Image: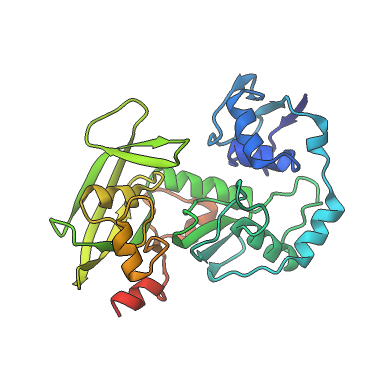
């Protein structure tokens, strides 16, 4: 068993991210499993993977010692040799806004361990000499939001713990407005409105079901949408998330009877094949810092709006 006390630099990180950093040789699947089995305790109790750690929290990890051996020299060589490929929308001393391409995973999973968005960002900052993983109490650059592998768009990366804390707080209080563009098969009826329901995820199938009424384990999901254009049986739709659930837009639009073009899980296979689309036409294209309360170190971003202009499927179907 090893024990860790969370310091200022690590405050605000998700539990599973901290465990992965503390035990760098532990496979991602085992990180999640050990948290579920309560082999990782926070202040003496089991916890959930998405819990944000606070300064002073005490973690006890009942994990074999060999998983904690940090190959520092090898890690530095990897960060120096890795060729980061990033489409940077905005950058300052506190954060990065990166336009993620479809097909790239944000974090390591059972299918990809190396070519991940967070590795591209960490290598980029290491090579700029803005981050040194070997430094005492070094904060590992972390992502503040996630996007599905086959969805493109803006991902926020924090360069320091205070930025991670502020962004997480603003996401929780809905003071960051994220807008998406998508192409649907058929047009929503009515053309604009709100989709509200409950989403229940099947962990084994990696699928989400939509319910109009509360169900055990279901989580509230609210999506606002607006049809921008229609052409040849397709529609260009803008969506804004009030909640951020797994597959929320994909499932919600399918519930309306107009699934996303290219969506292999919730869409229409025949239509996807006809258009030769293998990834859902969905892009997180705009981010607005719509603060209603003080943002501390990130107050200078108040009112700022960042967007992505070059969206492949929009250019293709709605030029």
> Is residue 273 or residue 171 the one in the foreground?
273
Position of residue 49 in the picture relative to residue 258 (left or right)? right
Name which residue lies at 74% across and 28% down. Answer: 63
- Residue 52 horizontal/vertical position (percent): 55, 36
- Residue 86 horizontal/vertical position (percent): 59, 69
The image quadrant that residue 227 belongs to is bottom left
The image quadrant that residue 92 belongs to is bottom right
Total labels: the figure holds 0
Furthest toward the left, the residue is 190
Furthest toward the bottom, the residue is 319
Position of residue 257 in the picture relative to residue 115 (left or right)? left
> Is residue 195 or residue 149 the one in the foreground?
149
Name which residue lies at 64% across and 61% down. Answer: 121
User: Does residue 130 lie above or below 14 as drawn?
Assistant: below
Name which residue lies at 70% across and 37% down. Answer: 7
User: Does residue 43 lie above or below 249 as drawn?
Assistant: above
Q: Check the picture and name the quadrant holding the N terminus.
A: top right
Confirm whether residue 269 shows in the render. yes
- Residue 257 horizontal/vertical position (percent): 20, 52
Q: Check the picture and name the quadrant holding the C terminus.
A: bottom left
């Amino acid at each position: 068993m090893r024990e860790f006390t969370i310091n200022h630099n690590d405050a605000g990180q998700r539990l599973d991210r901290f465990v992965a950093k503390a035990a760098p040789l532990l496979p991602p699947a085992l990180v999640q499993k050990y948290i579920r089995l309560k082999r990782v305790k926070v202040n003496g109790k089991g916890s959930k993977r998405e819990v944000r750690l606070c300064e002073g929290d005490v973690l006890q990890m009942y994990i074999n010692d060999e998983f904690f051996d940090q190959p520092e020299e090898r890690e530095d060589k990897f960060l120096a040799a890795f060729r980061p490929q990033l489409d940077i929308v905005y950058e300052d001393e506190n954060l990065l806004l990166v336009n993620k391409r479809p097909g790239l995973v944000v974090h390591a999973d059972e299918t990809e361990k190396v070519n991940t968005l967070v590795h591209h960002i960490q290598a980029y900052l290491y090579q700029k000499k803005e981050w040194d993983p070997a430094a005492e109490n070094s904060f590992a650059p972390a992502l503040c939001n996630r996007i599905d592998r086959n969805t493109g768009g803006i991902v926020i990366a924090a360069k320091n713990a205070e930025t991670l804390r502020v962004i997480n707080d603003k996401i929780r209080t809905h003071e960051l407005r994220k807008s998406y563009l998508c192409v649907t098969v058929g047009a929503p009826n009515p053309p604009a409105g709100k989709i509200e329901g409950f989403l229940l995820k099947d962990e084994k199938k990696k699928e989400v079901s939509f319910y109009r009424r509360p169900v055990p384990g279901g989580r509230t999901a609210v999506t606002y949408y607006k049809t921008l254009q229609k052409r040849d049986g397709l529609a260009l739709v803008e969506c804004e998330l009030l909640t951020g659930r797994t597959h929320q837009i994909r499932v919600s639009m399918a519930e309306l009877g107009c699934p996303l073009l290219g969506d292999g899980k919730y869409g229409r296979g025949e239509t996807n094949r006809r258009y030769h689309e293998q990834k859902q036409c969905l892009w997180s294209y705009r981010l607005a810092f719509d603060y209603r309360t003080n943002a501390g170190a990130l107050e200078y971003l108040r009112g700022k709006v960042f967007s992505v202009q070059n969206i492949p499927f929009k250019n293709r179907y709605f030029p």
